[in-house]
Image: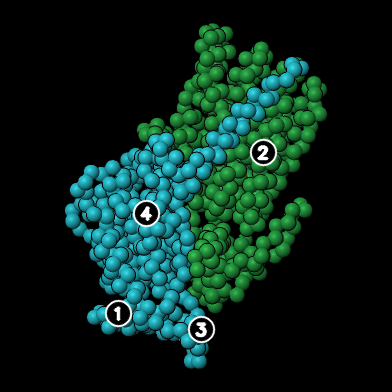
Chain colours: A cyan, B green
């Protein structure tokens, strides 16, 4: 059964993959709904201050997390990963810089680009013994991607996860029954269960603030505008310009992640500018929403169910013994 | 820069902070040059996979589903579905004792399956929210809508069976349960496959056949154990057929997964469970094929097959968890996909 044939059966009310220009409209919001809102996280100007993590925890009243006092002992990255209690996570990466590679130091160039762009050079540190290339630091504030095709939302059996009028994906805590299906469904490993509570939690893009015309707490708190909030279309234009600027300055490794509506999840509502490969930041290099293959899964389950029925009938045929 | 011990060593290095000491760079680019090892004659050799990660941390979240609740739920659902089929067909072909065994097993296993599912929920008191909506994109929603009427029908059939009342209604309920039986036996494969877990998702074409075969093997096995030998012949045939389907589909699935993604099925606890499941199922099928009317042989074969079927679910469950735990299984196939796409478009 082809994708289209599957849809015609009425089993797939919405499209399962591919670009989707009006994600809220596809979810059933009538014309006149707000534009799709999103995050553009420009990691080239992230200073790893974690103000976003703190602002998120404060606004959303998130438990501190690991251990009695919420301290993991890992000072540079205390929270370690996104989870039920960590809706913004700042990754901290230290890499040896290979000298004489001929490549432009991405961070120095990024700082320079930022300076010529009218903002302040943040003076990223250079460390290391004389003679070697030293190390470089990469910081990146990760967050729920608010996918165009969100696996968590697709597989949720209770309807607790839903698409908002802003095109974001939000859990309704009063409906979630803690089945946990969304947890392994997310191709980014974002949503998680709070063990002491039983239900799942993740970033809401501060749904309660958006309704009041405020920007999300993390974007508000970000001192370098690494986290930018706005209409997704506009953010994409801004990101394209920033990428071109960095490439002009010789930062060949700069790349946009999650910006492309043709990718495996139909593009992310929260996308990134990275200075290294996605997996270095703990991001999957080519995520595909699992329900992309749902027509094939359904077909094979139907075939297997048929085989089970035929096998049973065959076993009862033949002479009585 | 590689670690000598493969993904297990990688997992042990799973401390983000290790990136801030001298070994950090090693962990960063750790692919794990796989030691070539052989397990039970099965080659589990994977060429060294170089891949990047965030200090070896998992990308995916491991399923939070509890052990043994969820594998038990998978096994019992399959057993219930297969048993309902056996009961209805035994009814239609005049085998009352086999019908009775089938009806009792279907109802008891369905009830236990629901129990395991509810117990696994983070908020068990909200289990009825499963039936709040019908969502075709969620195999758990579709599955709940299969499981709920199935359980009701199976309970109706067994109530009639045990009380001897309303035999026509009992027969209708049993037939209804049998119609849902094949779906009961297979939907749990969609449940696992419709996730980002590499060892489950990439096996989505064969997994329904593995589970369907496994369900028939288990249901046939209970029939062999509990029904008198005079009526157990179809159960025996079905058990052997199911075991064959399970073993064959399992082989095909591992071949399709390829050396890298089949690895979780060959290593660690999942590897031991998978091997045990294969041995139990094959031995049970062999014994079942020659058992004939020798009851003690049938009982032994049934015990092996039922154990094999349950072990299969635990093996698949564990393999999925292992494949979510190691970022290698997420990054390397996706990198290969990107490289293949880049090669296609010049």
Q: Which of marks 4 and 1 is in front?
A: 4
Q: Which chain carries label 2?
A: B
Q: Which of marks 3 and 2 is in front?
A: 2
Work out whether B78 lies above or below B94: below
Compared across the picture, whether A256 is left or right of A96 comes to: left
Query: In the structure shown, which secondary structural element does the residue marked by tag 1 occupy?
Result: helix
Provide the residue designation for mark 4: A19
Q: Are marks 1 and 2 on the same chain?
A: no
- In the image, what residue occupies the spot 59% across and 35% down? A304
Q: Which of marks 4 and 1 is nearer the N terminus?
A: 4
The x and y percentages for residue B207 are 59, 42
The x and y percentages for residue A18 are 40, 53
Compared across the picture, whether A209 is left or right of B137 comes to: left
Give the residue furthest to the top: B165
Q: Which of marks 1 and 3 is nearer the N terminus?
A: 3
- Is disc 2 surrounded by few (<14), some (14 to 19) or many (20+) residues within 10 Å? many
């Amino acid at each position: 059964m082809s994708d289209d044939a599957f849809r015609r059966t009425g089993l797939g009310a919405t499209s399962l993959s591919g670009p989707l220009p009006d994600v809220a409209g596809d979810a059933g919001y009538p014309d006149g709904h707000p534009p799709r809102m999103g995050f553009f996280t420009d990691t080239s100007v992230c200073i790893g201050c974690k103000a976003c993590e703190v602002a998120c925890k404060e606004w959303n009243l998130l438990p501190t997390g690991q251990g009695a006092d919420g301290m993991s002992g890992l000072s540079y990255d205390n929270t370690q990963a996104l989870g039920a209690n960590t809706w913004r996570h700042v990754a901290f990466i230290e890499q040896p810089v290979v000298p004489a590679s001929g490549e432009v130091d991405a961070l120095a160039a990024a700082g320079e680009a930022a300076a010529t762009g009218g903002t302040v050079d943040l003076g990223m540190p250079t460390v290391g013994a004389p003679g070697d290339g030293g190390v470089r630091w990469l910081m990146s504030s990760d967050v729920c991607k608010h996918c165009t095709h969100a696996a968590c939302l697709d597989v949720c059996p209770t309807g607790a996860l839903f698409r908002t009028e802003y095109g974001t994906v939000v859990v309704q805590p009063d409906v979630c029954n803690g089945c946990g299906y969304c947890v392994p469904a997310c191709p980014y490993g974002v949503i998680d269960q709070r063990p002491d509570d039983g239900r799942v939690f993740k970033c809401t893009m501060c749904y309660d603030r958006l309704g009041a015309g405020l920007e999300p707490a993390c974007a508000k708190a970000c001192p370098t505008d690494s986290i930018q909030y706005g209409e997704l279309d506009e953010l994409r234009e801004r990101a394209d310009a920033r990428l071109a600027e960095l490439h002009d300055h010789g930062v060949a490794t700069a790349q946009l992640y999650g910006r492309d509506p043709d990718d495996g999840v139909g593009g992310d509502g929260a996308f990134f500018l990275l200075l290294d490969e996605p997996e270095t930041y703990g991001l999957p290099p080519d995520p595909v929403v699992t329900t992309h293959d749902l027509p094939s899964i359904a077909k094979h389950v139907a075939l297997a169910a048929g085989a089970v029925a035929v096998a049973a009938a065959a076993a009862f045929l033949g002479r009585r013994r | 820069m590689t670690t000598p011990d493969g993904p297990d060593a990688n997992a042990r290095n799973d401390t983000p902070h290790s990136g801030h000491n001298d070994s950090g760079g090693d962990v960063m680019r750790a692919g794990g040059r796989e030691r070539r090892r052989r397990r039970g004659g099965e080659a589990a050799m994977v060429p060294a996979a170089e891949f990047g990660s965030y200090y070896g941390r998992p990308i995916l979240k491991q399923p939070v589903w509890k052990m043994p609740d969820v594998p038990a739920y998978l096994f019992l659902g399959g057993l219930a579905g297969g048993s309902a089929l056996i009961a209805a067909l035994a009814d239609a072909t005049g085998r009352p004792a086999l019908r009775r065994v089938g009806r009792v097993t279907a109802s008891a296993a369905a009830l236990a399956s629901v129990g395991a599912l509810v117990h696994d929920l983070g908020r068990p008191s909200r289990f009825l929210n499963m039936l709040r909506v019908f969502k075709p994109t969620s195999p758990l929603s579709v599955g709940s809508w299969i499981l709920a009427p199935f359980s009701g029908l199976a309970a109706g059939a067994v109530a009639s069976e045990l009380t001897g009342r309303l035999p026509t209604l009992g027969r209708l309920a049993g037939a209804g349960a049998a119609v849902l039986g094949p779906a009961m036996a297979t939907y749990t494969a969609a449940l696992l496959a419709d996730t980002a877990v590499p060892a489950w998702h990439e096996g989505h074409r064969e997994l329904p056949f593995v589970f369907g075969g496994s369900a028939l093997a288990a249901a046939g096995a209970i029939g062999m154990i509990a029904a008198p030998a005079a009526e157990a012949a179809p159960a025996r045939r079905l058990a052997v057929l199911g075991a064959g389907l399970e073993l064959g589909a399992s082989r095909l699935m591992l071949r399709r997964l390829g050396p890298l993604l089949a690895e979780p099925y060959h290593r660690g606890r999942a590897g031991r469970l998978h091997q045990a499941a294969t041995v139990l199922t094959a031995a049970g099928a062999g014994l079942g094929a020659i058992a004939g009317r020798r009851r003690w042989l049938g009982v032994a074969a049934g015990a092996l097959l039922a154990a094999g079927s349950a072990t299969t679910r635990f093996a698949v469950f564990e393999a999925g968890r292992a494949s979510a735990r190691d970022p290698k299984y997420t990054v390397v196939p996706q990198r290969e996909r990107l490289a293949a796409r880049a090669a296609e478009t010049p």
